[in-house]
Amino acid sequence: MIIYIMNASKLLMFSAIALILVSVILASDSDDENVFKPAPIPGSQDVLSKAELIQLKGAFGAESVAFDPNGEGPYTGVADGRILKWQPHSQTWVDFAVTSSQRKNCSRPSAPEMEHVCGRPLGLRFDHKTGDLYIADAYFGLHVVGPTGGLATPLVQDFEGQPLLFTNDLDIDDDDDIIYFTDTSTIYQRRQFVAATASGDKTGRLMKYNKSTKEVTVALGGLAFANGVALSKDRSFLLVAETSACRILRYWLKGPNVGNHDIFAELPGFPDNVRINSRGEFWVALHAKASPLARLIISNSWLGKTLLREFNFQQLHNLLVGGQPHATAIKLSEDGRVLEVLEDVEGKILRFISEVHEEESGKLWISSVIMSSLGVYDLS
């Protein structure tokens, strides 16, 4: 009898899921619309397949890129916990820093089950006054390391007595000596990022760290997968990516709206890091575009949590990213207008990108948390 009830319950659950999915398919008013694949973006340029690849060689998952005050680099954090520095003359990567001293078993390029021991550096930013590198480590919180590298020093690892579970990205306000950083979730860790997306979790936070007083406060809470952070050129506002909501929020730091936030841009997919260029425009890297099915899953927490129980990580990730995964980079103006969309539509070279960093020379450095190389695309 118990087995019968369990089977009947499971059948009812799957029937409900099937009904929801069929409803989405029937609701499509276009014969060309595919609920499992994202729609094309009007005006997009399919050019990123021309990017040059720089292999990490024995490393994996470069999340963020940063150049030091001397223009050297880039530096990038990889899945085994190291921060690497690119040497362009010798065309090699060298070890620069780590966030964990416990590195005895941290030799594999990718070992998610060891991230909490080896560290997982995500967002990177240099303080251009001091040359110090600030690091958002997913498991160990906010860290800093000096210009010569080595073992980083922890700055913020917990808040109100609770450890930070998923520190993600940061930006530095040099004028006020403030670091803004994101805590993606108070429930899920980095290796559970698919669960954090599908479950409807909205415990993400934008945090504020005062370098002088060491005080940590919450600037903005209730975020759906708080991710990339970028200050505006005049420091009047800050952008924060809400990955699960497929949008960018603007948090006002100055002016009549100080302390308030609004929607800066709605996006066709899941934003990761946001980086400003020298003109004050913002590049947003999409981990993937969102299909109608993906939007249904992330908008319905019951459905998302049910799928989490029935599908493994890879299966659910495939459902969310839909079709052929490929790179999508979107450039936004200072007021949130789409200026340019660059893609590798067939995913020939670039997929699952995490960050787009524009050098003044016109080169785009494109990183990916899931690939073993960085892309370099020349805008000229």
Image (tube, grey):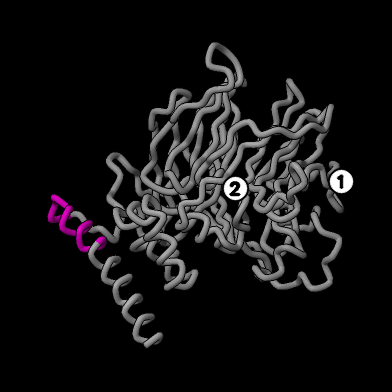
Residue designated by label 2? 184
Secondary structure beneath dot 1 equals loop
Q: Is residue 347 left or right of residue 21?
A: right
In the image, is residue 144 above or below residue 191? above
Mark 2 or mark 1, which has the lower sequence index?
Answer: 1
Residue designated by label 1? 148
Distance from Cα at disc 2 to Cα at disc 1: 29 Å
What's under tag 2, amino acid-wise? Thr
User: Looking at the image, which is closer to me, 20 or 271?
Assistant: 20
Q: Quadrant of the N terminus?
A: bottom left
Q: What's drawn in magenta, residue-wise?
A: 20-32
In the image, is residue 257 above or below residue 261? above
Where's residue 290, x and y in %? 36, 52
User: Looking at the image, which is closer to me, 318 or 84?
Assistant: 318
What's under tag 1, amino acid-wise? Thr
Tell me the chief SS of the magenta region: helix
In the image, is residue 3 above or below residue 110? below
